[in-house]
Image (cartoon, rainbow, N blue to C red):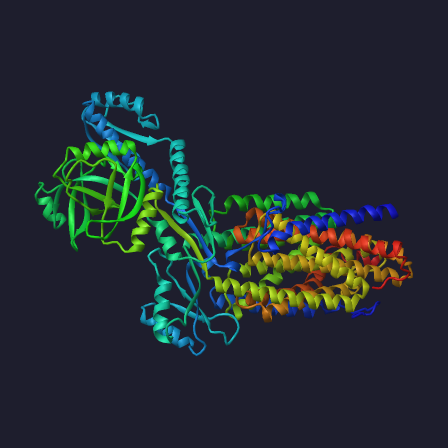
Amino acid sequence: MERSLRWRGVLVLIVTVVALLYLVPTLVKKVPDSWPNMFSKRISLGLDLQGGMHLDMEVRTDKAVENEVIRIKDDIQRLLRKKKIWARSVEKTENNDIVIRFLSPEFREQGLEFIDKEFSDWTIEPVSSKEGRIVTLKLKDEVREHIEDMAVRQAREVIERRINPEGVREPSIQTMGRKRIIIELPGVMDTEAARRIIERTGQLSFQMVVDIGPTAQALLTRHEGKTPEGTVILMGTEQGRSVVYLLEKEAKVTGADLKDARIGYDEYGQLAVNFELDAKGAKRFGVLTGKNIGKRLAIVLEGEVQSAPVIKSKITDRGQITGNFTPEEASELQIVLRSGAMPAPVEFRYQNIVGPSLGGDSIQKGVKSAIIGGILVVIFMIVYYRLAGVITDLVLALNMVLILAVLAGFQATLTLPGIAGIVLTIGMAVDANVLIFERIREEIRTGKTPRTAVDGGFSKALLTILDANITTVIAAVVLFQFGTGPVKGFAVTLTVGIMASLFTALFVSRWIFDLLLVRVGMKKVSI
Amino acid sequence: MEFIRPGTRINFVGFRRYAAIVSGILILISILTLILHGGPNLGVDFKGGTLIQVRVPPEADVSGVRNGLDEMGLKGAEVQRFGEPGSSEYVIRVDVSETKLERLSDQIKDNLEGRFGSDTVEIRRVEVVGPKAGRELTDKALFALFFAILFIAVYISGRFEMKWMPSALMAIAIGVPSYLLRDFVGLSAMILLVVFITLALCTVLRFRFALGAVAALIHDVIITVGAFSLMDKEFTLPIIAALLTIIGYSLNDTIVVFDRVRENMKKLRKETLREVINVSINETLSRTILTSLTTLIVVVVLFLLGGGVIHDFALALLIGVIAGTYSSIFVASPILLILEEKGRPGRRRSR
């Protein structure tokens, strides 16, 4: 008994010390530099307690696939023409298939052979029939999935660069499932701006201007009522008036060729964004501007013509985007251009912004009421169970320390539902002690000695406590498995709490009782 | 100190008819108010929409806030005082959750400051939930709840009645089809149906303990949900956490009593089951009251002092803990008896 008392004491001591070490970073503002790395993790507070922004969005990967299909469709069209394999039309369908109508079965044969060789990402339907001129190309599933996954990955990187351009904030950005991105930004900030900046596609391209008119109608009449082959119509404004541009469809230089972008001033002292191209882009830009001197080049930003200056001389690696920018607009544009284009638009699913003052209030009031409640329970237990009540209170304090230490070790985020989980487990920990004490009292009433009464009390309460706690753990595991964020948080704290309360109620408080009865030689149980 | 004298013999089982009436009435009221209110009053986290919480100067009142919103053309907006009566915080709910709602909170702030003076209005919280996210959240929460209950039923039948195999088979028979069918049938309808089937199967297969425990926790959840609906309180994520806590609490309470019943069934072989249950409830009464009391102390303090968000959370717990304590004595235990008496009349009595 003496020996087992000692090693049990050592175990309790070790657990307590380790738990306290884990808790230090959470409790103090800053740990000393020499603090061991192992214990440097801390509990962070959820946005509901701290204030900040939570954004949950879905990347429209269907759009990414669509864009890719359009790009390939244009490629096929161009290459077939180059090879003199004539097709009446090459079109994209609703399902992102490509339908090619060849002029004759012979061209179809040649076309198929060519596509089979060059575009291995596609399956061809129908394969067998020799007759007919129509062919449907379907994107292979694994290729589609790859495009989707890449889009989500890129979107995530772009978003990260946009919301954290200086790399100083500590945003948490997670990918959930295959398409969702979840961002958590603690602390104060302009949330509307953050959201706006994420939503921007950031697509930039440089396209030659073919023609300009006041309306689309006016433009089209000059070109036989339809947009000429290889051109597109885009809108823009010049000196406050809306203008319609007819542009070359193909963009020789795009935002992907940018090396850097920074805020500067134009010749009139207005804010502008200066950009710098990388070597490849600069080469292409040089060729483009060099052979088009005197013509107008459109700078297309997010589907609109931002400006269309006349090319005065050959430009290689530098340029400027002008517009009547406010300082905010200019700095946003700079961030967006630097971060690169979004591969696909995002759709917001959920957005939660908690002001820091509300978060602070929640914590302050929550902590205050928890402390008052705790003190009342502590007093009540001592009044009702006397010395045994004191033991319970000690054990409960250790229980709290253990739960928080484990949460710190996991670097868990504490939210309101998480606190609910802790409240429940503290309740269950009190209950475990009450169960044991009531059993001990029953044993004492049957006239047993203190030692046997304590023995009997613990062993008889054991099964009940285990049953109650295991059932709750089952519930917690299922909730964790099927639940979403907040439900998961509840499940985690609940499971951790149950483990802690089993340890403290069954092991630690037993050890204290044995210590008092054996070592101190207490003759009567104060319960 | 002792609240309950040892050897107390209250005839709890004798009250079971009255208890059935009380529970029946409470459940009926709960279901009725739910029907009258058209289902639970779901918060924006579940239903989608925009929620903006503002703090205005104390002299401002609801109508002032509402007029401001009307002026902005937000006629459908709901305005509700937040937290304790007398607080000067309001929650504004708008049905739309489009991305185009840009700067809505800024607009509201500007408008209200125009009314109440500059720098007097504070935007405390903005929550925008897309309809898709809301649905998914509801579905997942319900689904998690349902599976938790199913597995608990298995564990209880296994532990208390050694019916591991049949109960596991039951869980598979119910769980797998509902998991596979979850996308095809309306989830809430399916869960109602499946819960009903589970209860029925537990009855037919005579999983008495599982039936008692599950019935008790469903009883507690319905009453809490009903009370919230009656008070026109909103269901938000913290309230769901509270419901989960109630389930945990109710279960814990029931199992403690059941454990004693199981123990006494072996010890008091000569007694009728009715007597065994009565003795067991009385023996655990002291602990039941103590545990409820300590939990209630904490919950009441949270309710009174916890502030806005915690206020409603604590209210749900308050109702749930009281219901949970009551149900483990007056709902779960009598169910053991009903099945026993109907199944093998007088077997224990004849011995």
Residue ranking furthest to the bottom: B59
Residue closer to the observer: A93 or A279: A279
Q: Quadrant of the C terminus of chain B?
A: bottom right
- The one nearer the camera, A365 or A42, is A42
- Residue A85: in sight, yes or no? no
Query: Is A245 on the left-hand or right-hand side of A146?
Result: left
Q: Is residue B264 left or right of residue A209?
A: right
Q: How many marks?
A: 0
Q: Position of residue A181 (x, y in %)?
A: 44, 46
Q: Residue B70: which quarter of the image?
A: bottom left
Q: Quadrant of residue B251?
A: bottom right
Q: Is residue A454 above or below residue B19?
A: above
Does residue B279 show up?
yes
> Which part of the image, by quadrant, shows the N terminus of chain B?
bottom right
Residue in view at x 30 percent, y 53 percent: A329
Residue A230 spot, x, y in % from top left: 18, 35
Horizontal placement of B123 versus A370: left or right?
A: left
For this view, does A287 lie left or right of residue B280?
left
- The residue under the point 42% across, 45% down is A160
**Location of residue A360 with respect to A293 vertically, above or below:** below
Q: As rendered, which of A100 and B111 lies closer to the eye?
A: B111
Q: Which is more toward the observer, B80 or A211?
A: A211
Q: Where in the figure is residue B270, as x and y percent of width and height?
A: 86, 58
Give x and y (percent) for residue B235. Answer: 51, 62
